[in-house]
C-alpha cells in the first residue's frame, strides 16, 4: 500500500473507534465543561469581574490543558498488542501522520466547542470573533502537532507521563505566549494585519513539527 492509502485507512480507523467508543471526545468535553464552570464560580460566584486579559489567559490555559490530556492518549494509552499489530501492518510514516491528522481535527473541534462554551458562560469580550476563531484553529492545530510528537517520544520510556510533562513545558510555553498575544489583538479589535507575522510563525512551527515528526518517528518506532 502507498503512504496515502495507509494513512487514509488509519485515519478512518481512528475516527471509527472514536465514533464507537467516544472515550477521548467525551473525556475532553467533560474536562472543558468542568474547567469552565469552575472558572465561572471562582470569578463570578461572589459578584467579581473578569478583565479581557484574564479572560484570554484563562481560555488558552484551559485549551492547553485539554490538549495535553487529549494528545497524550494518542500513544501513551495504546495497548501493546495494538502497537505490535501496527508494527507489522503499517509504515511508521503512515502511523504518525494518521495520529497527527486525527489530533489536529479533534483539538480544532475541541477549541471551537471550548470557545463557544467559554464565551457563553464567561461572557463574550471578543470584538473580532472571526479573527479569534481563526487564531483558535491555528493554535489548536499547532498544539496538536507539537504534543502528538512529544507523546510519541514519551511513549518509548517507562515514565512516559512524567516525560510528557517535562518535554511539553519548554516547547508549548512559547507557542502559548504567541497565542495569548495575537488573540488579545482580536479581543481588542485591532487591525488584523498586526497579527499576520505571529500567525505565520505558528503555522511555520506546525509545518516544521509535522515534517520532523515524519522524518524521526521511524527511528523511534523501530525501538
Image (cartoon, rainbow, N blue to C red):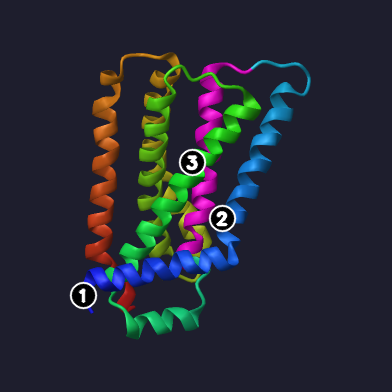
Q: Residue 72: horizontal and vertical position, in percent?
A: 49, 59
- Do residues under tags 1 and 3 come within 8 Å of each other at their CB atoms? no
**Residue at image mark 3:** 111
- Nearer to the camera, 148 or 29: 29
Q: CA distance from mark 1 to mark 2?
A: 30 Å
The image quadrant of residue 114 is top right
The reply to whether the magenta stretch includes residue 178 is no
Residue marked by disc 2: 25
Q: First in sequence: mark 1 or mark 3?
A: 1
Seen in the picture, residue 104 relative to 11 is either above or below; the reply is: above
The stretch in magenta equals: 50-75
Earlier in the chain: of badge 1 and badge 2, it is: 1
**Mark 3 residue element:** helix
Side of 177 where 43 appears, left or right: right
> Residue 215's spot in the image, x, y percent?
22, 64
Other-residue count near label 1 (Cα within 10 Å), few / some / many at <14 / 14–19 / ≥20:
few
Choose top left, top right, bottom left or bottom right for residue 87.
Answer: bottom left
Q: In the image, residue 105 lies at what x, y percent?
A: 41, 52
Tell me which residue sits at (45%, 19%) in the image: 187
The residue lying toward the viewer, choosing from 118 and 151, is 118
In percent of width and height, residue 157 lies at 44, 70
The structure residue drawn at horizontal position 67% and vertical position 31%, both measured from the top left corner, is 39
Q: Which residue position is annotated with label 1?
A: 2
Please tell me how crowded label 2 is: few (under 14), some (14-19), or many (20+) other residues with Cα within 10 Å. some
Depth check: give the residue in front, 208 or 32.
32
Residue drawn at (61%, 43%), measured in percent from left and top? Answer: 32
For the residues labelled 3 and 2, say whether their Cβ atoms are less than 8 Å apart: no
- Give the CA distance from mark 3 to mark 2: 12 Å
Q: Tell me, yes or no, whether the highlighted magenta stretch contains residue 73.
A: yes
Amino acid at each position: 500500500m502507498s503512504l496515502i492509502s495507509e494513512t487514509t485507512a488509519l485515519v478512518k480507523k481512528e475516527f471509527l473507534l472514536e465514533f464507537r467508543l467516544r472515550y477521548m471526545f467525551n473525556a475532553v468535553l467533560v474536562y472543558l465543561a468542568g474547567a469552565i464552570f469552575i472558572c465561572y464560580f471562582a470569578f463570578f460566584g461572589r459578584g467579581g469581574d473578569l478583565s479581557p486579559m484574564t479572560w484570554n489567559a484563562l481560555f488558552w490555559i484551559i485549551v492547553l490543558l485539554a490538549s495535553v490530556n487529549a494528545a497524550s492518549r494518542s500513544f501513551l494509552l495504546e495497548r501493546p498488542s495494538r502497537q505490535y499489530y501496527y508494527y507489522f501492518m503499517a509504515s511508521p510514516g503512515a502511523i504518525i501522520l494518521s495520529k497527527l491528522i486525527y489530533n489536529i481535527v479533534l483539538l480544532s473541534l475541541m477549541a471551537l466547542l471550548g470557545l463557544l462554551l467559554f464565551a457563553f458562560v464567561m461572557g463574550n469580550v471578543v470584538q473580532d470573533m472571526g479573527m479569534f476563531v481563526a487564531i483558535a484553529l491555528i493554535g489548536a492545530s499547532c498544539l496538536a502537532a507539537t504534543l502528538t510528537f512529544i507523546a510519541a517520544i514519551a511513549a518509548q520510556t517507562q515514565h512516559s507521563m512524567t516525560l510528557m510533562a517535562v518535554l511539553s513545558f519548554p516547547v508549548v510555553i512559547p507557542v502559548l505566549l504567541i497565542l495569548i498575544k495575537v488573540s488579545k489583538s482580536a479581543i481588542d479589535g485591532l487591525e488584523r494585519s498586526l497579527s499576520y507575522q505571529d500567525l505565520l510563525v505558528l503555522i511555520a512551527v506546525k509545518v516544521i513539527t509535522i515534517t520532523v515528526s515524519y522524518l524521526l518517528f521511524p527511528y523511534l518506532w523501530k525501538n
